[in-house]
Image: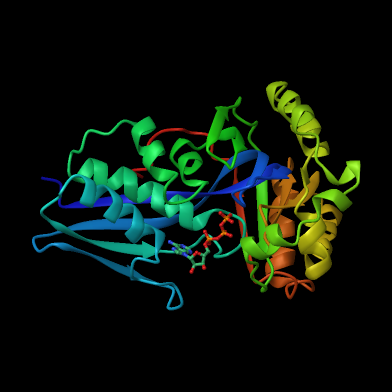
Amino acid sequence: MIRHLGLKAYGKINLGLDVLRKRDDGYHEVRMIMQTVGLYDKIDIYLKETPGIEVVTNLYYLPVNENNLVYKAAKLLMDEFHVPHGIRIHLKKFIPVSAGMAGGSSDAAAVLFGVNKMFQLGLTREELMNRGVKIGADVPYCIMRGTALSEGIGEILTPLTDMPQCQVLIAKPSVSVSTKFVYDHLNLEGLKKEDHPDIDGMIEAIKSHDIYKVSERLGNVLETVTIPEYPVIADIKEKLKELGAVNSLMSGSGPTVFGIFTNPIAAGRAYEELRYGECRNLAKQVYLTNFYNTKEVPNG
Ligand code: ATP
């Protein structure tokens, strides 16, 4: 029996995010272009002889009970398959929390994968994705990964061509944003046409493998809610472009901003500037990473 598994749970950014309508059940119907990035949380799963799920994490403010998505993911599979053992999950967070990068969903996806492997449950990737959506709308995507169109409430996924390699600078200001707040305050009727991103145009740009066309079409309708609330997001977007990003955008419901760089030297300089330079107060967390295209299983 496997006694220990080390996993990597990768974060995502949205190259495009559009909201089509609010459904009667309260969920919003979306069209999003998802992209995995190289920034990841580390998860270790250890087998325990005694039953139960124990969670240990480096962030004191995260729950370690059933409110943590890693706990929920483990419990879902271990209950269904009546696993007689227990596990201890060590979660080391690097992906910014409440930031629009699906960190919690990605952790859950990695744990579904890990528990399936540790106890040889024999579930396929698709079967894991069907269970993942019960934990969160983004979990199926976090199991699939890579570049994808996400529709419905996030559970209808179409893989897209891999993105060309380039540098992605991620900057999260000190504010945290609740996804619920942003969706609750989205005024779909009051939006102008140009507030909606051109998702079909983005899909064509991705197919043509042209990073400049992709960058031109970056767009996120949720910026109409989050930026007026936190203008620092607009400041970071501007700063990234000033420092050489081809373009920049807020990811998910925010407040994380990313900039796409085709010049590694400019990307390195921009990182230094945001981390240590005069504008170091704009963002609390800054990471220089890239698009993570591999769809291999997350057992790094
Ligand atoms: P999304 O991009 O899907 O909107 P997010 O980046 O806004 O996600 P997360 O960091 O995934 O948000 O989750 C934030 C909330 O979920 C916090 O309230 C946090 O307490 C709770 N949470 C539960 N489990 C986790 C986890 N493993 N990692 C991060 N947050 C978690």
The quadrant the C terminus occupies is top left
> Which residue corresponds to the image point at 46% horizontal and 50% vertical from the top-left?
106
> Which residue corresponds to the image point at 39% horizontal and 64% vertical from the top-left?
68
As displayed, is residue 46 above or below residue 38?
below
The quadrant the N terminus occupies is top left
Residue 217 screen position, x and y as percent: 81, 37
Please state if 228 lies on the left or on the right of 181 as rendered: right
Q: Which residue lies furthest to the front in this view?
A: 24
Q: Name the residue nearer the viewer: 247 or 177.
A: 177
**Colour style of the rendered protein structure:** rainbow
Q: Residue furthest bottom?
A: 60
Snapshot quadrant of residue 20: top right
> Which residue corresponds to the image point at 78% horizontal and 49% vertical from the top-left?
221
Regarding residue 20, the answer to whether it shows in the image is yes
As displayed, is residue 104 above or below residue 67?
above
Residue 99 screen position, x and y as percent: 61, 62
> Which residue corresponds to the image point at 29% horizontal and 46% vertical from the top-left?
114
Please state if 192 lies on the left or on the right of 277 as rendered: right
Please state if 267 lies on the left or on the right of 133 as rendered: right
Residue 219 screen position, x and y as percent: 78, 44
